[in-house]
Image: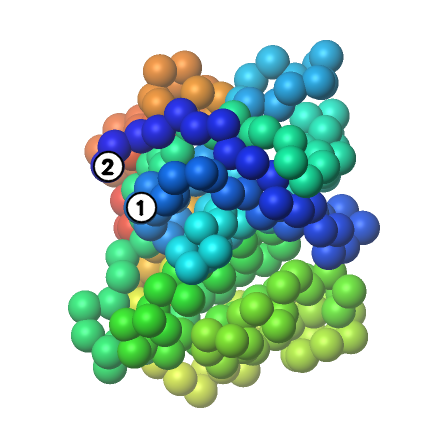
């Protein structure tokens, strides 16, 4: 896909959690086509310690409002600067980058979308695109506590939502791979994004259940184009750049075991 370098305008920055903000961006021209699972490399201005662009998953694309949504964890100098943006400011973005999740080929496919933490971000756009195709996704979302669950009302617009929390404050207690849903139902495919230990556990479950599984990796990505080699991942085909050859991989290609 063609890549664009755009100065997008901030529509709003909404703090949805003590550590997370939702940034809505727009442009004077229609935004380019973007696929679920792709990401954006953002230039952070005004941060003396942030020299490299920051990779952020595409959370949602609202074509009617011509908006791109980015869910950002404000954990360092660069991302805290992004969280402090004001409506009307510009954000320099390189997009869309990487590959996306495999979308269903028929409406009857049962697809499970498993996310944890800020890793839930790309699954919202995938679920929304599936719903447009007439295919209802099942979301399995995990967090430490109920207050750490993100954008739940948005997810419920597009499919069934199942939840686990480590303390049992909402949904079933435990990790996502402990949810009773996985013992009760069989899925045609799984897509997952979140902490690496969680994704590895999901991949093990998928292998045992003989289910296709894709994972969106969150390796450190500096350039987004495969030039700097800082995001290399070991695969069955050798070392591959997550930013260029991913970030979405069939888990059978990953040397996680």
Q: What percent of the width, then of the height, locates residue 3?
A: 31, 30
Residue at 34% in and 22% down: 226
Q: Do the residues labelled 1 and 2 touch (CB within 8 Å)?
A: yes
Which residue carries the number 2 mark? 1
Secondary structure type for disc 2: loop
Q: In this view, does 234 lie above or below 16?
A: above
Q: In which quarter of the image is the N terminus?
A: top left
Which residue carries the number 1 mark? 33
Q: What percent of the width, then of the height, locates residue 230?
A: 45, 20
Q: How far apart are marks 1 and 2 (CA)?
A: 9 Å
Q: What percent of the width, then of the height, locates residue 96?
A: 36, 37
Judging depth in this view, the residue of 111 and 79 nearest the camera is 79
* 142 relative position to 104: left or right: right
Local crowd size for mark 2, using a 10 Å CA cut-off: few (<14), some (14–19), many (≥20): few
Residue at 40% in and 70% down: 112
Q: What percent of the width, then of the height, locates residue 252?
A: 29, 50
Q: Is residue 226 above or below residue 175?
A: above
Q: Can residue 122 be seen by looking at this rendering?
A: no
Q: Which quarter of the figure has residue 104?
A: bottom left
Of mark 1 and mark 2, the one earlier in the sequence is: 2
Residue at 58% in and 47% down: 24
């Amino acid at each position: 896909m063609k890549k664009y370098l755009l100065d997008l305008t901030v529509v709003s920055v909404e703090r949805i959690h003590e550590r997370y903000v939702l940034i809505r961006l727009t442009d004077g021209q229609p935004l380019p086509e973007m696929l679920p699972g792709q990401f954006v490399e953002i230039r952070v201005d005004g941060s003396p310690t942030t020299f490299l662009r920051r990779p952020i998953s595409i959370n949602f694309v609202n074509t009617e409002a011509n908006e791109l949504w980015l869910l950002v964890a404000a954990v360092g100098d660069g991302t805290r600067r992004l969280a402090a943006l004001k409506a009307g400011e510009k954000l320099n973005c390189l997009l869309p980058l990487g590959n996306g999740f495999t979308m269903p080929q028929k409406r009857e496919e049962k697809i499970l979308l498993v996310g944890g933490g800020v890793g839930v971000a790309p699954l919202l756009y995938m679920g929304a695109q599936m719903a447009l195709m007439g295919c209802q996704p099942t979301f399995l979302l995990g967090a430490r506590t109920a207050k750490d669950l993100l954008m739940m009302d948005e997810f419920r617009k597009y499919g069934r939502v199942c939840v686990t929390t480590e303390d049992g404050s909402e949904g079933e207690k435990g990790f996502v791979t402990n949810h009773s849903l996985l013992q009760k139902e069989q899925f045609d495919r799984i897509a997952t994004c979140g902490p690496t230990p969680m994704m590895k556990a999901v991949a093990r479950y998928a292998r045992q259940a003989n289910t296709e599984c894709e994972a969106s990796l969150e390796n450190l990505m500096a350039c987004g184009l495969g030039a700097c080699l800082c995001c290399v991942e070991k695969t069955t085909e050798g070392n591959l750049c997550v930013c260029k050859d991913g970030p979405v991989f069939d888990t059978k290609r990953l040397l996680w075991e």
